[in-house]
Amino acid sequence: MRILFVTPHPPSRIRVRSYGFLEQLQRKHEVTIATQRATERELANVEALREQGFKVVAVQESKWQEALRSGLALFSSLPLQVVYARSARFMQTVQQLCAEGTFDVVHVEHLRGIASMEEIAHTYPLVWDAVDCISLLFKQTMQAGASLPVRAVAFLEHKRTQRFEAGLLSRLQHTVVTSERDRQALVSLLGNATSSNGEQGACIDVLPNGVDLEYFRDTHQERRPFNLVFLGKMSYHANVAAALYLYRQIMPLIWKFRSEVTLTIVGSNPPKAIRRLADDRRVEVTGYVNDVRPYVQRAEAMLCPMLYSVGIQNKVLEAMAMGIPVVVAAQTAASLQALPGRDLLVAHSVREFADVALSLMHDAKLRTALSQRGREYVERHHDWSAVTDRLVDIYQQAIAGHRGKRSVREVTTPFVFSGSSV
């Protein structure tokens, strides 16, 4: 199968979903990656993909173009993410790739990815990996965002993102997301909407994230006594809110009983509010690291007190795969098939997070049981090979459906967006 894989950012181990799919697809299929890059780190990620044997077409995006598109969002009814990501140059590059090569299917990742793909959505079998329901994320952010500006942006973006997602779903025939909660949120947006050619938007499937089980495994690294870890990309506002909540609300209760407990916050691009936490000698803020595994594996437990979230928390799955006990918020657990109390532990309040963390640090037998069962859960439900096999099945459905439509009619209704691109 020849696959054109379109993504708004170069896949890497940090952008784990696209990276996991690509590693598996490359083994049996011919894959071309089309992506955008704007930073030196993204350029390095592109070169790393090429070294792994991928054909990568990367469109350079300048800072002024991104700034201009962000400014245009103020005068648009489209979501900020869509206007910001929509690139005429990226769109033209993908169109040229399609004209030069015969692809069996086009895979487009994220809301930012689909923003530039309106010209090909009706001419090729297309699968949109929405990943998460973004309007659901904004709904939660309005209430629990880490700062007033974050909540204000969510308020402005919520309704127009709802409208945009609903419009996409009424036109696209194959959409995938990471969790059942996100699928239900998108289904509720779709409602009874129909496309301009009278057809109901078709399938929304759940494809959970996988884990590289060889890369993320227990290396039996020596644990650091009374060390807890929080892991997450710190440029993401939901992770910032969770890390601040952990430090300000949960850790004081833990330190009241165990003053020697330390906290490590691991993740790239921490804002000033997070960096300041390192002024406390009991807290380490790493910033970007090439390899998160040593920081996670030395901890006695991972705490993941997400105040709001969508999709699946990769950090939780990776810690479980490495045999690290995890304590998560109820809504994080709801996105998984893991059994609370067996595969992981769930806390519903500040007090519960503190009590469970203290219990774990004092109970080696419980840590060992959670370590073993957490790894077994990930092996059963989040093996990239099995998840990718399901993705290929969806590709085949998209291909068959597209052929069927072409045999019924020769002219299709164009997939049209309003708004401008730069």
Image (cartoon, rainbow, N blue to C red):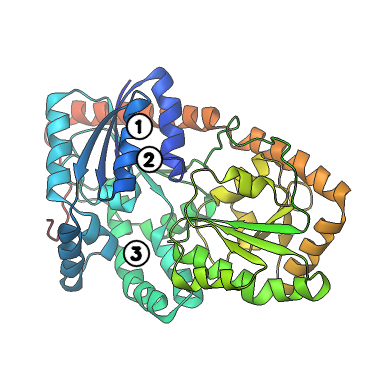
Query: From the viewer's perspective, is the residue at label 3 or at label 2 nearer?
Result: 2
Q: Quadrant of the N terminus?
A: top left
Indicate the secondary structure of the residue bearing disc 3: helix
Residue at 67 percent across and 40 percent down: it is 322
Q: Would you name the residue on which mark 2 appears?
A: 11
Residue at 65 percent across and 39 percent down: it is 321
Query: Which is more toward the observer, 40 or 316?
Result: 40
Query: From the viewer's perspective, is the residue at label 1 or at label 2 nearer?
Result: 1
The numbered mark at residue 49 is 1
Q: Position of residue 351 (x, y in %)?
A: 75, 73
- Please tell me how crowded label 3 is: few (under 14), some (14-19), or many (20+) other residues with Cα within 10 Å: many
The answer to whether residue 346 shows anywhere in this view is yes
Query: From the viewer's perspective, is the residue at label 1 or at label 3 nearer?
Result: 1
Disc 1 marks a residue whose amino acid type is Leu
Left or right: residue 40 versus residue 86 is right
Indicate the secondary structure of the residue bearing disc 1: helix
Q: Residue furthest top?
A: 28
Residue at 48 percent across and 44 percent down: it is 290
Q: Position of residue 392 (x, y in %)?
A: 42, 27
Q: Would you name the residue on which mark 3 appears?
A: 162
- Please tell me how crowded label 1 is: few (under 14), some (14-19), or many (20+) other residues with Cα within 10 Å: many
